[in-house]
Image (cartoon, grey):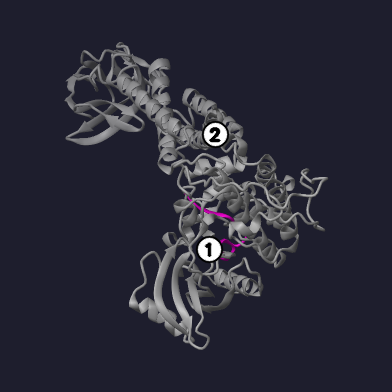
Amino acid sequence: MSVRDLTGEDTDRVRAALPGYVIDGQVGRGGCGVVLAGTHRGLGRRVAIKQIPPQFAHDAQVRRRFVGEARLMAAIDHPHVVPVYDFIERADLCLLVMEYLPGGTVESRFATDGFDAAAAVAVALSCAAGLEAAHRHGILHRDVKPSNLMFSRRGALKLTDFGIAKIVGGDETLVTRAGEIIGTPSYIAPEQVRGQQLSPATDVYALSTMLYQLLSGVLPFPPDSDQLAMLFAHAYGEPAPLLDVAPGVPEPIADVVMRGLTPDPDHRFATAESFGIALAAPAALCWGVNWLPPVGIPVIGADTIVAAATGGRWSQGPQTGYVPRDPLPVRRSMPTARMLPREPVARTGARLVDVERADLIPVQRVVHLSSPRVPLLVAGVLAMLTVGVAVLGLGPGPNRDLPALDTIRVGGVDVAAGEPIEIDLSRPVPISVTGTDADAATLAVVVLGTATGGTATPLSAGPSGASAEVPAPVHRYVIAGDLTARLTLSRAGIETATYDFGVRTTQSPYPTAAAVGTLLLALFAGAYAESNARALRAGGARFAAAVGLTLSCALLAVAAVGAVWVLLGSEPARTTVIGCAVLGAATGSAAAVACRRLGRRRRYLRITRLRDLLREP
């Protein structure tokens, strides 16, 4: 019973768990689980049964939180909170039995009929009354939105889905690794995005967002297909003033809404009750003390809010600045224009039924705006260290195994002298050998410890030893410059001696395949690094781009070793190449972290600019 609809077997499990109820079947499938309708056998009372997705119910901590929250929710007795009649916690089955609400949601009514300003305020007052009752029981909703406000058969509004976010995530606000919030990101409070301490002011922010939408037809922050950008906007942005997008809203009401949207929770209304009082008072001022009954959305079980809405006195809550000195009129002209959505009613994030617990992480891990300075500094230091190792080398240089004096000459020069011997790769190389029992010689070059090229050439005996002109070990356009040569002597095909020594070719190393290959490697790695860095800086914080930047920087480091060899004639050791590749990869990793942090900042700036553009007339 997860993302798919219920099967007969699934329904049978629920029936077995709830023998006191007649289970009618599935009536809905929301982000928090499957909803079934049922009827209590003895009382004949219709109920809705909500199931926590099994992939979460398997977790023992989730089940413990489910039991705790279910008991707290069952203790709330308020006309604007859906009552919880029963709950089941058994193996991987977690069920909540609640009142069945057939009247639809605020979301659906807003989308089809719209609300005038008075009705929108009445919706907010009902919600504030229900939230205050829950807060006094120590329960935060954490996902207040139009789809979680439902109408009963008699027209009263009731809050649903209390505690679901806490049951699943505990005190953490969870997102997928791609930045999709569990719930609806359009209504999330800044402190939720930042992973900070939550309070009743968190629900006040969501309620203010919903009221802003009902009054204006739009959300405080522009919709964005990039949910991570929306999270950044809520975490660090300022909402567009309500009067800028809905000039017809009474100014004192707009002021209350905007205070409820203050990013700092300490400057927001501390409780849902204080928000309700502050909102109800200007409503009575604008529309008269009898404005509420004609709206048809009752506000019940909140004496202070009702008193403020009817022009009476209240004992709690802040003054709004709009307290009249003269008695309020009984009735003023009521708003008649209905506001319909000017954009989609909700931007739905990830659904619990569609994800696994292992796919979720705390929101602050993807939204925290860490400074890129430290990783940039680390990347710079590592880059300089990489260049230093490429130039100076790491570990011992190439091994040189020299023969005894006056035993072997190459190009007329005694190999035992230890100085680089000049050879011309366009001609055969003369070799003379004395004091050794060999009948053939092979001259090769050693690149990173591996012999390359060379052809066995017979030695001709003479009065002063054996000699031969052996072919050049490599083509002059393949590799040139300062190299390590390897002379191998053999007799009857069996190797008798091997000597490594330095040579310097008369040909320039620049017009060689090695030089061209180094250049192409540098160009390819540089372009690949820039492409991946650009993707990360643009906010495309993908794992593939980070890995690509790491690998491309490692290739750039290898190209740097080759460039030093070609330009400076410093033949590298294998340890130098490996060391530079490792340092280059570390440089790329640090640069990827810095670019990712820059990308997150750019996303925030992008959504800020978009919001500013939308504010312009």
Q: Residue at x 49, y 73 (%)?
A: 48
| Quarter of the figure with residue 435 | top left
> In the image, is 232 to the left or to the right of 480?
right
Q: Residue type at mark 2?
A: Arg
**Residue at image x 35%, y 79%?**
9
> Residue placed at 56% from the left, 36% from the top?
245
Of the numbered discs 1 and 2, the one sitting upstream in the chain is 1
Which class describes the residues within 10 Å of circle 2: few (<14), some (14-19), or many (20+)? Answer: many
Residue ID for mark 2? 611
Give the magenta-colored segment's residue range. Answer: 164-177
Extreme-bottom residue of the structure:
42
User: Percent x, y for residue 165?
Assistant: 56, 61
Circle 1 residue: 150
Asked if 455 appears above or below 145 in the picture, the reply is above
**Residue 113 visible in image:** yes
Tell me what residue is drawn at x 48 percent, y 74 percent.
49
Q: In the structure shown, which secondary structural element does the residue marked by tag 1 occupy?
A: strand
Q: Residue 612 got which mark?
A: none
Answer with left or right where residue 599 lies relative to residue 315.
Answer: left
